[in-house]
Structure formats: structure tokens, C-alpha cells
Image: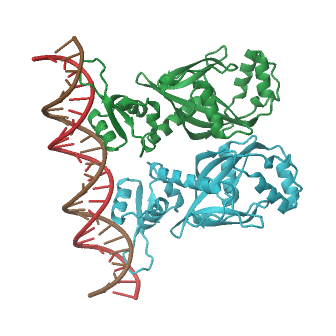
Chain colours: A green, B cyan, C brown, D red
Amino acid sequence: MDLIQEFEQWVGEDTYIKQVSIDCVIFGFHDNNLKVLLPKLKLDEDLWALPGGYIGKDESVLNATRRILESRTGLVDIYLEQFGVFGELNRNSKDLVKTITNKIGVTTEEHFWVFDRFISLGFYALVEYSKVTPRLNNILDESCDWYSIKELPALAIDHDQIIQKGLETLRIMLDHKLAGFNLLGETFTMKELQKMYETILDKPLRRDNFQRKMLDMDILERLEKQYTGAANKAPYLYKLKTIK
Amino acid sequence: MDLIQEFEQWVGEDTYIKQVSIDCVIFGFHDNNLKVLLPKLKLDEDLWALPGGYIGKDESVLNATRRILESRTGLVDIYLEQFGVFGELNRNSKDLVKTITNKIGVTTEEHFWVFDRFISLGFYALVEYSKVTPRLNNILDESCDWYSIKELPALAIDHDQIIQKGLETLRIMLDHKLAGFNLLGETFTMKELQKMYETILDKPLRRDNFQRKMLDMDILERLEKQYTGAANKAPYLYKLKTIK
DNA sequence: CCAAAAGTGTTATTCATACACCCATGG
DNA sequence: CCATGGGTGTATGAATAACACTTTTGG
């Protein structure tokens, strides 16, 4: 099946709820950077958009979000949180979608529902960077890669604002729901944990006090030491306590 | 125009976005109780539902929410916050809407879009209780009154869960955004402020420390004393400082 | 003068921050 | 032994909680 057929099947069928989309800010932590997974659009210009999609007429919103997340990361059972609704009239996706369909080679017809005005539900997801194998959406994506939150590429529509709102919400929820641990692997050193906090909050934290604060919360289980071969004391590995 | 005509105009026209609704948890503070404005449905059984509505095809989500809020409270420029999306498949509004349309006397037709499955966007609003004049939606409501959060009546679909989630979010945001002040009038005594906090958080607070905490925030302006005629020291009135 | 509630000074406790030192590790 | 980074004891300061006292009001 070629792209045009695939596209026409996609927009032709009456399978999705109209005028509502989901946009996902997929956060990963790597190389002491908070990163976002961003597909690059198939356009002449360089433009990126959040991984998103539509909700099936007989599909729960949660399921749709999980489906979208799995389609780009390959992961199931991802931590996610809804953080906002983006429904202003001036968010113009029509021109963008038209440009893309033209590029693919689809004859644009005015009545295609994808050209309509959309309300977007914003979710952020926290994933373990190393476990993700970025996947392409055959129709839309030219590439799909991680970008540091500090060096975001050119983003479509209001996706930069969506990312910003998602990041703000993550910062508020970081301690409140212990969300950040979803960015790390099963085990981690205290330094890794601290770097993750520092990166999300975008401010330095004191090593000694951070360690105490985390240990005092009584949520960490100390495991064996991690011998890295470096000429210094080996740090302990920790994991989140299972039962609370 | 009778009810049936009004209904058919409502569902007949292609003015709203399909399968998406807005539900508003309108909080008011009165008589030391946190209350929610709830319309009672036109049914044989006693059932209440959150004030809600649909989003116009050419209307922003924010505008739709404000329109819904004004239609029930008579107030414009209401403080509101989006707190969740309710999109599970088992939220069955179809039977409910059918029962209502039967009750009104409308010939139910399967294709009416209002019978479809809906995703609801949850907003909470904070209003000044005394300024609200509850209004009826001519088609749907039998009555519209305030109910204490502690003694909620029977609620349709998942509206009890929506209220609960809204309340939880309000609690988290209470200090963070100084949201609670929107429940009080222009001026208020420290006791009123404290009662409002206690009611929302559902826990007692110490009078002395609460006063200090509020004053230390440097957001309150002290006005004249309020002589109530009671045999005790007259409390000061306060208002939120205008410029920050 | 009294009771009730408001306002505030003072103390105690807890929590966050800062400084210091010791320990482990590989070269 | 050294350099480097990890772990923790302790001191300091800030925020919070608790106690106590004084003031104001109408009867």
C-alpha cells in the first residue's frame, strides 16, 4: 500500500472523533539533559510537531494516548498525565496539514475532516530514554529524534507552548507525585537522581542535602555498590521501594 | 417556541463539535460550606448533573466554558481552571439523554448526535456565592441549586468523580495560585478567609498562625474595622492588594 | 466587670540549608 | 599517598507550630 492509499484510508474512514486531537510531550532524560521526542514533518522547510493522533470513536482517551505513545516509542505501560486543553481558534493546523498532503501527493479535498479546526488534549509522558526506539509514522514523519528542552527546533502551530505548559506542570508535580522516577531505570545512583531533579527544575541542588531529603522520604531501597572503575568511592545503587 | 422545537433546533443544527462536552464544577462558599451549583434534571427520578454544554464549531474552548458558566450563574469573567479529561468508554450518557428527550416529548431518532459517546473536559470555577443568581436551562433543568460538597445528591454518569477530581485539584492549587480568594467578596475578615481555607482543605487551622501566614505573604491590605454588634473586638476587613 | 473574639509577642519545634569531616576507590 | 567523589555528623537559619498575653467590643 502506498502513502496516498494509506492516507486516504486514514482520512476517508469514519473511525475517529472529529476536531479533537491528542498531543504528547514525551520526556526522556539522557546525558544530563531533559529531552523531548519530536518527529520531523515531511516538508520542504524544517518543521517539527509533537507526536499526536486522534481518538477512535470507540476508544477511550487513555487508550488513544497509550496507542499514540506506543506507536512512537515502542513502549507500553507508560507514565502519563493530562495537563491542558488547547482550544483557541487561532491555532491553525489547516494550512500545515494541507501542505503535508500536497507534499505527499494527495489531492486535497476541502471536506477532509483533517483540515478542520482542532482542539488538542495535552498529555505528558515520562519514559526511560534507553528503552525507547523512536519509530516513524509512515505518513507524516521524515524522522523522529530526541531534542533537548533547551534547544528545541522549529515547532508547528502552538506546540512550543504545549511543551512549555507540560514542563511547568511536570515541575509542579515532580515532588507531589514522585513522577520523576519514571525517567530513570530500575536502579540508579543518588547522583543520577539528583541530576534528573536539577535538570527538570533547572537549578542546582546541594549534594548532601538532596541525599538526605531523598533518604528521609523513606521511599528508596539501598542496593549493592556500583563499581565503575573510577578512582573514588563507589556509590550505592538505589531503587524505589516496592510496597508503600 | 416550545421545548420540542427548541430541542430540535439545538440538536438539528450543525453548530457544535461532536462527541466533546464541557462539564463545570462551580464552587461557591456559603454558610461555612463549600458548595457546588447543580441543576436537577427533568426526570421522574431525582438526578442531578453538572452544568455543561458543547463547544461551537467556531468557538474557543475558553469561550464555550465562559458561555456555559454565564448561562447558569449570570456572571461573566469567572475564575476557571481545566483539571481533567473524562474519556472512558463506560461513561454512558446515551441512556440518560434518551430518557430526558422522551420525557420532554421529543421523538428520539438514533442519529441525533447528542446520543453519541462523549468525552468531557472538566473545568472548575470559583464564584462569589452571593453574586450568583442560579438560572435554568429551559430544555434540561427542573431546578438549579447549591449543594454542600459533603451532601451531594445523586449524580448522573461519572459526575461525582468529576467533582472529586476537581476538588482535589483545587486543594493542590489553593495556595499555589491563591485561587481561593475568588470565592470571597471584595472584602473579607480574617476569620472568613480562614473558614474558607478550612472548608476546602477539610481540616482545622490555628487562628493565630493562619493570620500571621496570610499577613506575611504581603498580599492583603487592611481596611477599616467591621462592627458587627457582637460583644467582642471588631475584626478588620481585608482585601487583596491590587498591584503586585 | 465579664465573655467572646481579635491581634500580636514570645517560645518551641521542625525543616531546609550550610559547613565539615571521614570513607572508599583506583592509580 | 593522592585525587576524586560518596556518605554522613553537626551547626546554622528560616519557616512553622504552639503558648500566652493583651486588646477591643457590647452587655
Camera-nearest residue between A187 and A24? A187
Camera-nearest residue between A24 and B183? A24
The spot of residue B1 in percent (x, y) is: 88, 60
Is any atom of residue B78 visible in this view?
no
The spot of residue A171 in percent (x, y) is: 45, 38
Total count of labels: 0
Residue under the point 78% across and 46% down = B116
Q: Quadrant of residue A110?
A: top right
The spot of residue D13 in percent (x, y) is: 22, 46
Position of residue A186 relative to residue B81, above or below, is above
Position of residue B34 relative to residue A20, above or below, is below
The spot of residue A201 in percent (x, y) is: 41, 34
Q: Is residue D9 left or right of residue B226?
A: left
Residue under the point 36% across and 64% down = B206
Residue under the point 66% across and 33% down = A91
Camera-nearest residue between B13 and A228? A228
Q: Quadrant of residue A185?
A: top left
Is any atom of residue B72 visible in this view?
yes
Q: Is residue A176 left or right of residue B80?
A: left
Q: Quadrant of residue A113?
A: top right
Camera-nearest residue between B41 and B5? B41
